[in-house]
Image (tube, grey):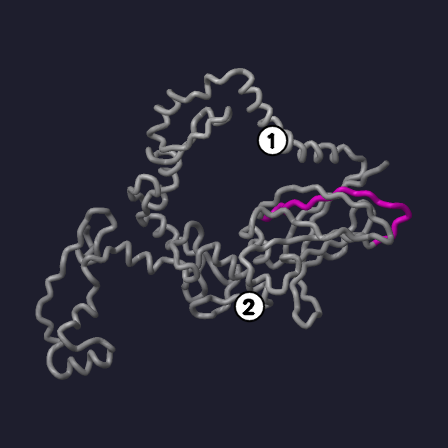
Amino acid sequence: CPGVHPSEGSLFPGAQPAGLALGPAPFLQGAGSARLLALLGAPSGPNWRSHWLLPSSRKLEERLYSVLCCTVCLDLPKASVYQCTNGHLMCAGCFIHLLADARLKEEQATCPNCRCEISKSLCCRNLAVEKAVSELPSECGFCLRQFPRSLLERHQKEECQDRVTQCKYKRIGCPWHGPFHELTVHEAACAHPTKTGNELMEILDEMDQSHRKEMQLYNSIFSLLSFEKIGYTEVQFRPYRTDDFITRLYYETPRFTVLNQTWVLKARVNDSERNPNLSCKRTLSFQLLLKSKVTAPLECSFLLLKGPYDDVRISPVIYHFVFTNENNETDYVPLPIIDSVECNKLLAAKNINLRLFLFQIQK
């Protein structure tokens, strides 16, 4: 490869780096060389070559792994790569986790290497590293062949003959899982297409029950959309700290008006446990509070969805409550976030922006 010394190895499997022919080194001979090597912390005996020169058997990509890896998890980034102001690299997951931890501990997030301040405004993506990582070879978990990381996902999903696949008759009960190259033989011998009508009807009944559960939520939402009084608004949760000896993080929105009533939303992390930053599993729960006085019980359905400019994934869940002057706040209910990674995205943000829908139920 032009411009690459043979000692640098090769990115292509099978290429063997050439050995180094070491000639005499007059600049490292004599009494002065011994003092120089001692100052540099290197052995001055016959083993000085092994200290200064990389082993010829060590491939270039192996050295690049240690250079391009995330400074937090020490693994190669799989998506976006962020860097602090001093150039230390962090994968997107670790970067968001550091910001979320700092919010929970009421501290300024810092780089784990140099301790400089990090934030979404101070750090930027390193596109060069992202492209370099995408070209590094990676091994397919099925066929054990090596491909550039940018092509590996497509290979494993569409091209690999050893990828795990399912029988096309799985919808009528076939449990077979196996390598793709055995799929044709299995489907030709599969017994499920020859099932009787009664057996197929039992399978279809189970599928219908599962489908009805999935459709129940959407039918409920469509029913609520037919109500006379419907209101929605964008809400912004802002972080605060309790006045306890051990302060706890909580979120609260400014007062807002929906359905001619004044409301407030509050949220807390992991049900206000003492040290949520020590837990890998993170959740958010919220409650809705009615701040205005009502002359009669106010029965409402409500749900929270992601805001128009956020990428967090939230599953819609409908909650019901009857508000009165004596009972004007709901219990804390789970904010249906997909997983802890999505929760960290919300915690890492300066504020949490969501959209609230309120449906007034009239008798």
Q: Nearer the viewer, residue 2 or 92?
A: 92
Q: Secondary structure at mark 1?
A: helix
Q: Nearer the viewer, residue 332 or 266?
A: 332
Residue 303 occupies which quadrant of the picture? top right
Looking at the image, is 77 positioned above or below residue 192? below
Q: Secondary structure at mark 2?
A: loop
In the rendered image, which residue does mark 1 sit on? 210
Mark number, residue 42: none
Looking at the image, is 206 positioned above or below residue 152? above
Asked whether residue 259 is drawn in magenta, I would say no
The Cα atoms of the two marked residues, 2 and 1, are separated by 47 Å
Residue 301, position as x, y percentages in the image: 76, 42
Q: Quadrant of the C terminus?
A: top right
Residue 214, position as x, y percentages in the image: 62, 33
* Residue segment shown in magenta: 292-311
- Give the side of residue 97 with respect to residue 45, left or right: right
Mark number, residue 108: 2
Looking at the image, is 42 positioned above or below residue 196? below
Q: Amino acid at mark 2?
A: Gln
* Label 1 environment density (alpha carbons within 10 Å; few <14, some 14–19, many ≥20): few
